[in-house]
Amino acid sequence: MGRRKIEIKKIEKKSSLQVTFSKRRTGLFRKASEISVLCGAEIAILVQSPANKIYSYGHPSVETLLHRYQTGGAGGSSSAGLSIIPYSEDGRNKYDEAVKKLEIVKRSMKQESSGISSTRFWWDEPMEGMELYELEEYVEAMEALKDNVSRRVEEMEKQKSNAASASTSDLDPSFQINYQDFDGF
């Protein structure tokens, strides 16, 4: 079946809620373990389930870190100047946007290095890999392009009609060519 993106909202079905909680809790604890091993971070996580059970993960232990937090950092060599930095969902959104912009820049740089973009216009680019926000921007850009082209066509038609009317009005109505004068040619 594979992975698919799900909408992040509260799950209403109780059995699905418990299964999802269990899987996500395991994943959360695994990631916490990885960051503590990779970066040497000391971690304490407390999670309350929908059934009101408390689950915890800690490295070196939850009790040690909670005690250090409650006493203001006393008792540990790495706890000088202890401060808690809360998680911010806004920060995550900014990070996701920056990653998307980076991917776009990387894609355009790759195309430039392969010589593709020098012979193609932006509207020739394939739309299959675009995200929803990219498609919305694409539609807006296409509509703006259509408006600009229509405006330019109207300007050119006005110039053409003005030039045509000016060239016929510049002629002297009394001027006529006598074709009999050119019989010998």
Image: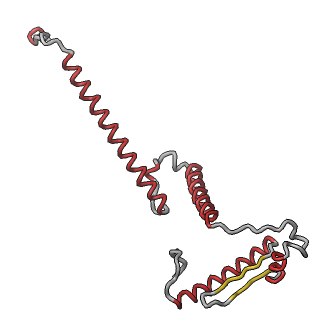
The image shows residue 161, relative to residue 55, as above or below, that is above
Q: Quadrant of the C terminus?
A: top left
Residue 177 lies in what quarter of the image? top left
Q: Residue at x 21, y 15 (%)?
A: 170
**Could you say where residue 72 lies in the image, as x and y percent from the top left?**
84, 72
Q: In the displayed image of the protein, which residue is found farthest to the top?
A: 181
**Could you say where residue 96 lies in the image, as x and y percent from the top left?**
60, 63
**Could you say where residue 11 lies in the image, as x and y percent from the top left?**
52, 82
**Could you say where residue 149 lies in the image, as x and y percent from the top left?**
35, 41
Q: Residue at x 65, y 66 (%)?
A: 88
Residue 61 lies in what quarter of the image? bottom right
Taking the image as shown, residue 31 lies to the left or right of residue 4, namely right
Q: In the displayed image of the protein, which residue is found farthest to the front?
A: 71
Q: In the displayed image of the protein, which residue is found farthest to the left?
A: 180
The image shows residue 145, relative to residue 153, as above or below, that is below
Give whichever of 114, 13 is nearer the camera: 13
The image shows residue 132, relative to residue 183, as above or below, that is below
Give whichever of 77, 98 is nearer the camera: 77
Colouring method of the image:
secondary structure
Taking the image as shown, residue 11 lies to the left or right of residue 36, namely left
Q: Residue at x 75, y 73 (%)?
A: 35
Disc count in the image?
0
Taking the image as shown, residue 69 lies to the left or right of residue 174, namely right
The image shows residue 26, relative to residue 81, as above or below, that is below
Q: Residue at x 68, y 83 (%)?
A: 47
